[in-house]
Image: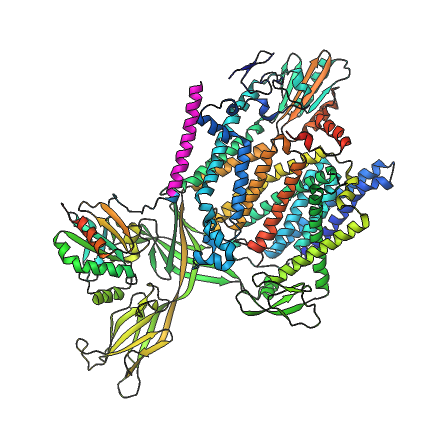
Amino acid sequence: MEKVKCECGHVNPFGTYLCESCGKPLIEEDTPVANMRYEGVARRSQTYNRTIVDKIWNFFSSVKVGIWIIVLLLIASAIGTIFPQEMYIPPGERPTLFYEQEYGTLGKLYYQLGFHNLYSSWWYMLLIAALGISLVICSLDRVVPLYRALKTQKVTRHKAFLERQRLFGISEDTIDADKEIKIAEKMLKEKKYTIRKEKGNILAEKGRFSRWGPYVNHIGLIIFLIGAMLRFFPEMYLDEHIWVREGEEVVIKGTNGEYFLRNDQFIVELYDTDDERFRQAFERTGQQVVKTYQTSATLLRRTNTGAVGVGTELEEVKQYDIRVNDPLTFDSFALYQVDYKLNELAEFTFTLDAVNDTTTEDLSDVVFTVNLYDPEYVYEFDNGYRIEIMEYFPNFYIDNNNQPDTRNMIPDNPRIIFEVFTPDMDPDSDSGELSLIGVQVNEPLIGENDYRIRMIDVDMKHVTALTVRKDRTIPIISIGGVIFMIGLIQGSYWHHRRIWIQNRDGKIWIAGHANKNWHALKRDIDFVASKAAIPIPKDQLDEEQNSEGEEGGNNSDSTKQ
Amino acid sequence: MKQKRLIIRSSILLIMVIAIGYTLYNHLYNERGLVDRNDVAPNFKVEDLDGNIIELEELRGKGVYLNFWATYCVYCRQKMEVLRDNYEEYREQGIEIVSVNVNEQRLRIERHADRFNINYPLYLDQHNLVRDAYGVVSLPSTFLIDENGIVIERQIGGRTESQVLASLEKLIPNQ
Amino acid sequence: MIQLSSNFLLISFFMYLLATIFFTVSITGKRFKTKEGEEKNKSGFYGYVFSILAVATSITYFILRWVGVGHAPVSNMFEYTTFLGIAMALAFVVIYPMYKNNYLGLFTMPVVMLIIAYASMFPREVQPLIPALQSYWLHIHVITVALGQGILALGFVGGLLYLLRVIDFRKITKKVVGVEFILYSCLAVLAYILLNISFSAMNYEATFEYVNENGVEAEITYYKPALVGPNEGVLLTEGRFDPFIQAPAIIRSDDLNTVLWSIIGGLFIYGVFILLFRQPIGGKIQPWLKNVNPNSVDELSYRAIAIGFPVFTLGGLIFAMIWAQIAWTRFWGWDPKEVWALITFLFYAAYLHLRLSRGWHGEKSAWLCVIGFALIMFNLIFVNLVIAGLHSYAF
């Protein structure tokens, strides 16, 4: 690769558009205004293209490729919202059937293409990864040469550089160019420009740091993406769910058996329907609105060390009312209120009745309570009666072999088979009467029974569901986000403006360049011209437009590359 | 100069590709459990229906067939019947079956033991501490722990009789 | 308090109208006030004064309603959409002094009015907040998003201005059709508002018995004559219009009917224009804009987007993530609304990068500004009302 030597003596890398030092165009273009992108420096990527590594590098170094990645991500993301993602379909629905049932053939296709889990698919993640690579390479390839160009720029620029700035003007005739330039300098200082001087020529510059904005925000984005990536590493991210009944102590998953939570009380509070403010809303919808979901919880911590399991001793750490939008935090964990179940069956209380009044015995003392979470085997009474639980099904159903069974251990549909022994029976050798009892179920299992077990009370409890979250990526993500915002603001709300004023053979040459916000640059120049006799530069793009305007009023072609 | 550039570019690309590759691998293929092959089996203490307590560490020198189960889990039942029929034989060869229930009602475990004539101890896992320590999500889950307390295999789901027997064979110490 | 705030909103609506009128005079006035250039400048100034007054009164509405409701009034469709309109007007008030462009006022104010009027078609009563929405982060998030979208919307106005200025309306090309479609869309919204007002003034109600998507018989009430009836619908109210066709059960037939009315209403207004002037509306507007400097509006729309983009990102992504972390346990969950905010972000990011290459200044850039605004509106209306996720405002 040959270096290009400019007539000012500066040696430029191959591929340079505008000499890094004096700004003379080294590669001619047929537009009246020079392309000032990246100061006309050679982007390194374009200049070497030998090995496969260079080819890959150059591919990702292109902004065009970057934009394509953004557009592809955009389209892919949009596709993911056509039908709900798998995690948002109603709970209990089978995705294999749901999409077809709900959305027909299109839904089936959507499912078959894997779009129901689009955002965690390998190709979507690869797209995001490609964006990350593009961010790194694009930024590296541009920031270094740009930094060098801005650092080495000379005050006195080449004539051709000035002529081909968008804002450019030459004075008709000036009395004392040096004097006017001095005044202009003073005015520019007033506008907080940094001035550099050389042989009576000046370069006024303002807001150069905004040029680094894009690179700062790209760094922020890269940090953000690294944070997002770390989520997939072990120990970084925890997403667990615990259900806790009122009064129950449950280990908090993911804490290695160290922390426990007790649900002291769970409440659902509704808005007062008499509230005058919301009267209209209640009338229109006819529905009550929930005001608060709250779990009053006690956090406990294990005090003994050694093997997990039996013999765990706990101490209370703190009490907290966990609400939606107000999680309980401890160590690096947070517990969020996410779901609940009201009125889960907890206890049944029974008594015993004689069916045909054949006995004269007093059965009023035969009252017993069965804890559905942990029933006793046997209930014995002073009058000699004895009731055994023969079988217990917390969540009863009949299985494929026509056998009674339970689905799980949660007492959603409890059935109990009781065996009743009268005082004159021997529980070891005799068999008592069997009855099957559940909610709204009470039937003898074999023939007719003399005794009937009657439910006299039911106790229920609320259950709260909490998400256990640990996310060690959050600090990284936050730092990334903050840096990103700083860079974005830096690049968007400040603008790099430069004004070159030169005394060429007694005439004042002026040229201006702005990176965004030409409007403000023009105003600055107008401000200077209000005191100093400098020429007001013309906007060469406007002139271009006007000349085209006469031809047909459509300027889009002229700006095409 | 050119050499340097190539090295810099290659290493930047390599770092990014490795990081992305590892992330994707973790996300898509890694089904490693919390406790898996070659890990030291976490120690625990559990109590059986009669109140006898065992600690895993005390079983050093024996092969341990650690099985998590529930009464409502059909595949667990099949497995437990195989274990029942072969329990005595393998116990003599230095194998202990530690059958940990997932915190069900005592009554149900008791009745289950009666109905299926289970001849080995059934342990209770209050608060599911042991289950969580082993990262068990589906049942049955079995961990084969060798005489040195190292997990040699993690099995999820049902197994045929011959598979269970093969697993037990593997556990026989000092082969 | 809430009644008072509504009055302020009404007053501000008329202020916006006055501002529009003054801006119109500032541009067209030249013709009937020849040689009085000074006079012309004045009306631009009055237009700006009324825009400021309008923004001040609408912010008063916002504060009063906040006090009355007890939370920032951005938590249902009416409140949010109204605030979006206010934010757009506010962005205009801030940007106008920089460019002193009366054309911008002429186009922004009617769009603001249209948005606020559209907002008031939603139920306006005060609604209690469900627990997930009870977070000041939510309010910070939503307010910032609206401000960002308001500024971005000015980019749309600049883009539209550019297109109306430079496109050749003498022959019907794709571009002309595109611009006419934008104008037609505004008219369709206008038609929707007018139809809603007129039918509710007439107390039009027609109840149907129909079979819903679960195959169960149900009743539905239409507030506009039914062009499309519900699935197997039978008209119960006497003397009401019997529909031509019936919608399939999975579609909300009354909403479809409303959309149909708006489309037809918009077509009607548009048709009247065409019959009157015998040329595209854009062609009719173009002569007024001959003094617009295309480069200057191009830059204006670019700046609006460069200013609005960080605000939108801060509100729509960063604050949104903070809120989501607290309320939904994770900062990002691929909820449709989140995804569409991301899409908007990506779109404007692509726009800003495209501005770096030369071919994307001017007209192409103007089209992108229009598409960006369409995305914002899509996100507001379609995603909220049709796709709806965690953010479902329309309850």
Residue C299 image-quadrant placement: top right
Residue C377's place in the image compared with C232, above or below, is above
Scheme of image coloration: rainbow
Q: Is residue A326 left or right of residue C51?
A: left
Q: Which residue is most to the left?
A: B92
Q: Is residue B25 magenta?
A: yes
Image quadrant holding the C terminus of chain C, namely bottom right
Residue at the spot x=45%, y=53% of the render? A87
Q: Is residue B136 magenta?
A: no
Q: Position of residue A248 (x, y in %)?
A: 34, 60
The secondary structure that dominates the magenta segment is helix
Residue A75 image-quadrant placement: top right
Residue A353's place in the image compared with A290, above or below, is below
Is residue C250 something one can see in this rendering? Answer: yes
Q: Position of residue A470 (x, y in %)?
A: 39, 46
Q: For this rendering, which residue is in front, C375 or C329? A: C375
Image quadrant holding the N terminus of chain C, namely bottom right
Residue numbers of the magenta segment: B1-26
Q: Is residue C301 left or right of residue B81?
A: right
Residue C210's place in the image compared with A465, above or below, is below
